[in-house]
Image (tube, helix red, strand yellow):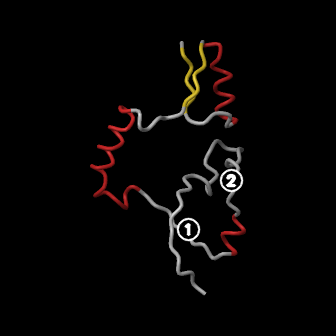
Amino acid sequence: MTSQYRGAAPTPGWFSGAGPRGTRPAPSGISTLALIARGVTLRGISAMDHRDAMPAYLREFGRAPREGALVYPYTRLTGIGQAPRALCELVAGRHLGAVLVEL
């Protein structure tokens, strides 16, 4: 039986376990068993599949951060003495986004 519904769900790095070696992917409310049981098909996507959209993408994602419509998360730690802590916490996955050490 094939489902009549189609949809897309962005899950970058989720199934690959993206992250430093030895770490696990972030917990998710999505059950892999439920996906399989429901016959869900997942297909990867690449920017190379949509080269025609690149000019619009560059325009939009150049404008949005400048106007504050798109904000990148980061954690800022002050002082060179915080560099080891920053690296340990980054590798441990404690922070979302970039970890900056302000000198």
Drawn side of residue 18 relative to residue 52, left or right: right
* Residue found 70% across the figure and 35% down from its top: 92
Quick check: 33 above or below 39?
A: above
Q: Secondary structure at mark 2?
A: loop
Counting from the top left corner in percent of width and height, residue 51 is at 31, 57
Residue at image location 66% in from the left, 69% down from the top: 35
Where's residue 42, x and y in %? 56, 68
Q: Residues within 10 Å of mark 1 (few under 14, many from 20)?
A: few
Name which quarter of the figure residue 74 lies in. top right
Vertical comparison of 23 with 90: above or below: below
For numbered disc 1, what is the local secondary structure? Answer: loop
Q: Which residue is mark 2?
A: 28
- The mark found on residue 20 in the picture is none
Of the image marks 1 and 2, the number of the one nearer the N terminus = 2
How far apart marks 1 and 2 lie (CA) works out to: 16 Å
**Location of the N terminus (image quadrant):** bottom right
Name the residue located 56 percent from the left edge and 35 percent from the top edge: 97
Q: Residue at x 41, y 33 (%)?
A: 68
Seen from the viewer's position, the closer of residues 74 and 86 is: 74
- Residue 42 — which label? 1
Q: Quadrant of residue 22?
A: top right
Q: Please state which amino acid type lies under the numbered disc 1.
A: Leu
Left or right of 68 in this view: 21:
right
Amino acid on which disc 2 is placed = Ser
Residue 54 sits above or below residue 99 on the image: below
Q: Nearer the viewer, residue 84 or 34?
A: 34
Front-lying residue, 52 or 66: 66
Give x and y (percent) for residue 100. 55, 24
At label 2, counting other C-alpha atoms closer than 10 Å, the crowd grade (few under 14, some 14-19, many 20 or more) is few
Percent x, y of residue 16: 61, 55
Circle nearer the viewer, 1 or 2: 2
